């Protein structure tokens, strides 16, 4: 349910209500029976230009600073509000430099679950390449088009009605609290601190590293969970 005040402690706090945050919230409640989650969303139920200024960055390089804010939407449902819905699997070459903490094979089973979340046809994950025409040696990897799914619409009823999920809007997290080895909770821009056993960072491609850096954290310093099973492990669950 939507709340304006939170408890002092939650088993799980999710930061961000985009595709990442809402998918994790839905699976933790629906499939893993987690009893109490706080979801903190910086934006409001609908897009608000003033709130979106929080996504502005100082940029150097080819892209102007204005590029980043219009690609990081601060609203319930996150950037899915403007997402075009093109869906495809990552190319093998994306993993060539070893920059991901997992292999392409580790990722493949998760595409099946993404299909249902993105409401794609069952045979959507196309892992084949096809020639662009019958006598061409140039191949392309087909992509699928989701509806596109607006996560703010898809999960609005869930967010309104679930007694296990507290959703707080206009709640910007300014710091992840930790003692150097474990996360302890979060602090909001208002200064209020909320304790948590686990914190799920789902603030998007710029928002996540920004919050980690603001918190004096880097991925090497804490053990990072990658799956909802790991997040729900050890938490009190129910029907
Ligand atoms: C114009 C456009 C078209 C696109 N088209 C496609 C496409 O066709 N196919 C595709 O795969 N992808 C597309 N994308 C990208 C896609 O929308 C994103 O990859 C996706 O939304 C990322 O989901 P996310 O949950 O990680 O982050 P986001 O959707 O960005 O959600 C992050 C949420 O975290 C909140 N937040 C951020 N910081 C804080 C904080 N400190 N405290 C509290 N809350 C915070 C934000 O308000 C936001 O709601 C497109 C993007 C744009 C801009």
Image (cartoon, rainbow, N blue to C red):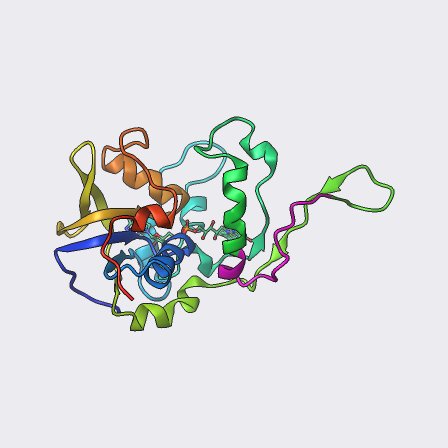
Tell me residue 103's x, y (percent): 50, 34
Position of 204 with respect to 164 (left or right) is right
**Residue 188 seen:** no
| Depicted 14 relative to depicted 160: above or below | above
Tell me residue 175's x, y (percent): 21, 43
Residue nearest the viewer, comparing 82 with 87: 87
Tell me residue 160's x, y (percent): 30, 72
Position of 195 with respect to 109 (left or right) is left
**Residue 225 seen:** yes
Residue at 43% from the left image edge and 62% from the top image edge: 151
Please identify the quarter of the rendering in which residue 130 is found. Answer: top right
Q: Quadrant of the C terminus?
A: bottom left
Position of 123 with respect to 40 (left or right) is right
| Depicted 203 relative to depicted 121: above or below | above
Q: Is residue 140 magenta?
A: no
Q: Quadrant of the N terminus?
A: bottom left
Residue at 65% from the left image edge and 50% from the top image edge: 126
Magenta span covers which residues? 115-129
Q: Is residue 116 magenta?
A: yes
Please identify the quarter of the rendering in which residue 225 is found. Answer: top left
Tell me residue 187's x, y (percent): 17, 47
Residue at 54% from the left image edge and 63% from the top image edge: 119
Magenta stretch secondary structure, dominant: loop
Residue nearest the viewer, comparing 216 with 71: 216
Position of 9 with respect to 147 (left or right) is left
């Amino acid at each position: 349910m939507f709340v304006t005040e939170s408890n002092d402690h939650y088993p799980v706090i999710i930061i961000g209500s985009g595709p990442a945050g809402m998918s994790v919230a839905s699976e933790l409640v629906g499939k893993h029976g987690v009893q109490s989650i706080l979801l903190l969303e910086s934006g409001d139920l609908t897009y608000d230009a003033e709130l979106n200024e929080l996504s502005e960055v100082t940029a150097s390089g080819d892209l102007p600073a204005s590029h980043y804010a219009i690609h990081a939407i601060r609203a319930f449902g996150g950037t899915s509000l403007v997402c075009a819905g093109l869906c495809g699997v990552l190319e093998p070459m994306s993993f060539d430099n070893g920059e991901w903490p997992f292999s392409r094979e580790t990722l493949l089973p998760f595409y099946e679950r993404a299909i249902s979340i993105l409401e794609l046809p069952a045979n959507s994950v196309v892992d084949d390449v096809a020639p662009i025409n019958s006598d061409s040696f140039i191949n392309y990897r087909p992509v699928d088009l989701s509806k596109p799914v607006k996560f703010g619409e898809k999960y609005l009823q869930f967010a309104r009605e679930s007694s296990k999920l507290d959703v707080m809007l206009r709640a910007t997290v300014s710091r992840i609290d930790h003692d150097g080895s474990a996360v302890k909770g979060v602090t909001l821009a208002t200064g209020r601190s909320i304790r948590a056993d686990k914190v799920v960072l789902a603030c998007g491609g710029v928002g996540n590293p920004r919050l980690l850096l603001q918190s004096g954290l880097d991925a090497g310093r804490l053990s990072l969970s990658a799956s909802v099973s790991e997040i729900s492990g050890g938490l009190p669950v129910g029907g």
